[in-house]
Amino acid sequence: MKLLVTGGAGFIGGNFVHYMVEKYPEDEIINLDLLTYAGNLETLKPVEDKANYRFIRGDIADRSFIMNLFETEKFDIVINFAAESHVDRSIADPGIFVQTNVMGTVVLLDACRTYGVKRFHQVSTDEVYGDLPLDRPDLFFTEETPLHTSSPYSSSKASADLFVMAYYRTYGLPVTISRCSNNYGPYQFPEKLIPLMISRALADEKLPVYGKGENVRDWLHVLDHCIAIDLIVRKGKEGETYNIGGHNERTNLEVVKTILQALGKPESLIEYVADRPGHDRRYAIDPKKMETELGWKPIYTFDTGIVETIEWYLNNQEWWQHILSGEYQNYFDNMYANRLKQS
Ligand code: NAD
Ligand code: TYD
């Protein structure tokens, strides 16, 4: 089988590539990524020389490039992780979210329709369901919860999901969608809550908590997300959406305090800052469909996963220090310059 993974130089896509390259030596895994600020080839070092792995730099929204690529490669399965993914950036500049998340997805769908695939899988988010009130812990997002978005980011992801379903209904394209809760784990870009707080706490810098820190997120270890996507692609039903989450709800303040405690840093580092505009209050997934239909269950609880994750950031400081210094952006040029010299 030939798999196209888009956005595989990012956090979740990178972890997914590691997982798939290791698990399916007989498959061919092609990673297509534009290498935006969030794409980091240093994340792919563990697999870059594997026989069943290849990297291609390119933009999912570049129609002629994508059409040529599909014509040449004849992919069996396409899994779309590529996206602009940070809510705060979407508030500052929504346009690129429409371009990549909506237009890019439509270009991929068109390529799949033109050249044929066994499956197109869209990696989506629970943020398409909007938020839940803090005083109703009995409420959860199910696959039937109406789309009701808050941020430009979640609006772009919901739009993409609607196009995916339109291509299923109108053209019979074999699609699936997964909507996962907040991920954490190795190789997450240090603009997102957990790696941001770890890297800042280690440098004894202030930790900016939005509002009162009472917003709730449902945290899932990235490996559990990767295992779930693999299952959906291989065993999920065409035209279906699957929610992925592990009932690990924490307030932001709880998360930040857990990190401070694990690192032996004082809570005086916490600094309450102005709230995010339109800040979603609570996300919480009901993962029953994944559990009953596909037999999925997360390996990690938040308590076990966060300890391992903090250890990873402690043991891999070079990886995130390169990002903070901007050095990671030279990796592509250096790597390919060296390869050109060798050939
Ligand atoms: P990320 O920002 O870490 O990575 C995104 C990757 O996409 C980067 O490598 C970037 O270079 C690449 N990319 C961006 N624009 C591109 C383009 N036009 N063409 C090709 N590549 C492009 O994001 P992430 O956190 O790994 O999220 C991956 C996917 O999972 C996204 O679709 C996101 O919406 C979804 N998701 C994320 C979370 C989360 O908690 N991080 C939760 C649920 C769903
Ligand atoms: P984030 O990691 O950006 O993910 P998302 O907004 O997609 O859930 O943020 C997680 C939560 O942490 C969210 O409620 C916003 C909050 N947050 C802070 O309080 N301070 C920060 O510096 C960041 C980046 C996030």
Image: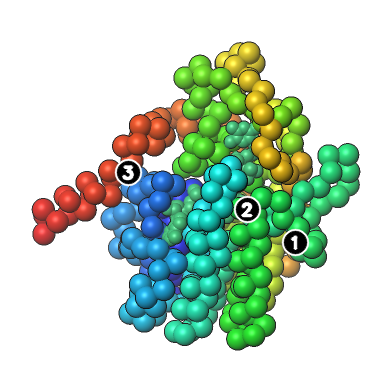
Q: Position of residue 30 (x, y in %)?
A: 38, 65
Q: Secondary structure at mark 1?
A: loop
**Residue 188: % across, % down:** 50, 42
Helix, strand or loop at disc 3?
helix
Q: Is residue 159 above or below residue 17?
A: below
Q: Does residue 213 lie above or below 60 as drawn? A: above
Q: Do tag 1 and tag 3 residues touch (Cβ < 8 Å)? A: no
Label 1 beta carbon within 8 A of ligand 1: no
Q: Which residue is mark 3?
A: 329
Is the CB atom of the residue marked by disc 3 within 8 angstroms of ligand 1's nearest atom?
no
Q: CA distance from mark 2 to mark 1?
A: 13 Å
Left or right, 164 with respect to 112, comes to: right
Spatial distance from mark 1 to mark 3, Cα to Cα?
36 Å
Q: Nearer the viewer, residue 275 or 114?
A: 275
The residue indicated by pointer 2 is 152
Q: Earlier in the sequence, mark 2 or mark 1?
A: 1
Which label was assigned to residue 147? Answer: 1
Chain-order first, disc 1 or disc 3: 1
Is 332 in front, or is 14?
332
Q: At 56% across and 44% down in the image, what residue appears?
A: 92
Q: Is residue 269 left or right of residue 70?
A: right
- Marks 2/3: CA distance? 26 Å
* Residue at the image point whose x is 40% and y is 69% from the top: 62
Q: Which SS class for mark 2?
A: helix
- Three-letter code for the amino acid on which mark 2 is drawn: Pro
Mark 1, Cα crowd under 10 Å, few <14 / some 14-19 / many 20+, is: some
